[in-house]
Amino acid sequence: MNSTANRLKNSKRTDKIPCYCVLENIRSAYNVGSVFRTADAFY
């Protein structure tokens, strides 16, 4: 195995905390996509 595969194999997996986002009165699909991208960046 190469070094990258070894690092991935030995890396510690962390538990993720559930995160909920409640969206109200969304008028455009672009806004929903923006919220998802922002949430993904911070999570």
Image (tube, grey):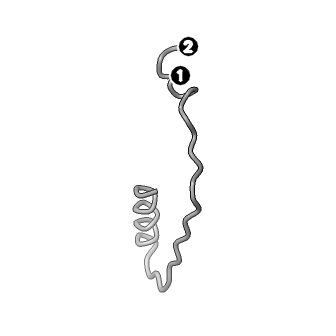
Image disc number at residue 5: 1
Residue at figure coordinates x 57%, y 53% from the top left: 16
Mark 2 surroundings: few (<14), some (14-19) or many (≥20) residues within 10 A: few
Image disc number at residue 1: 2
Indicate the secondary structure of the residue bearing disc 2: loop
Above/below status of 31 relative to 15 = below
Residue at figure coordinates x 59%, y 49% from the top left: 15
Q: Position of residue 42 (x, y in %)?
A: 41, 58
The residue type indicated by label 1 comes to Ala
Residue at figure coordinates x 46%, y 70% from the top left: 32
Indicate the secondary structure of the residue bearing disc 1: helix
Asked if disc 1 and disc 2 are in contact, CB closer than 8 Å, the reply is yes
Q: Position of residue 27 (x, y in %)?
A: 44, 82
Q: Is residue 11 left or right of residue 27?
A: right
Q: Residue furthest bottom?
A: 25
Q: Quadrant of residue 13?
A: top right
Residue at figure coordinates x 58%, y 26% from the top left: 9
Q: CA distance from mark 1 to mark 2?
A: 6 Å
Q: Is residue 19 left or right of residue 39?
A: right
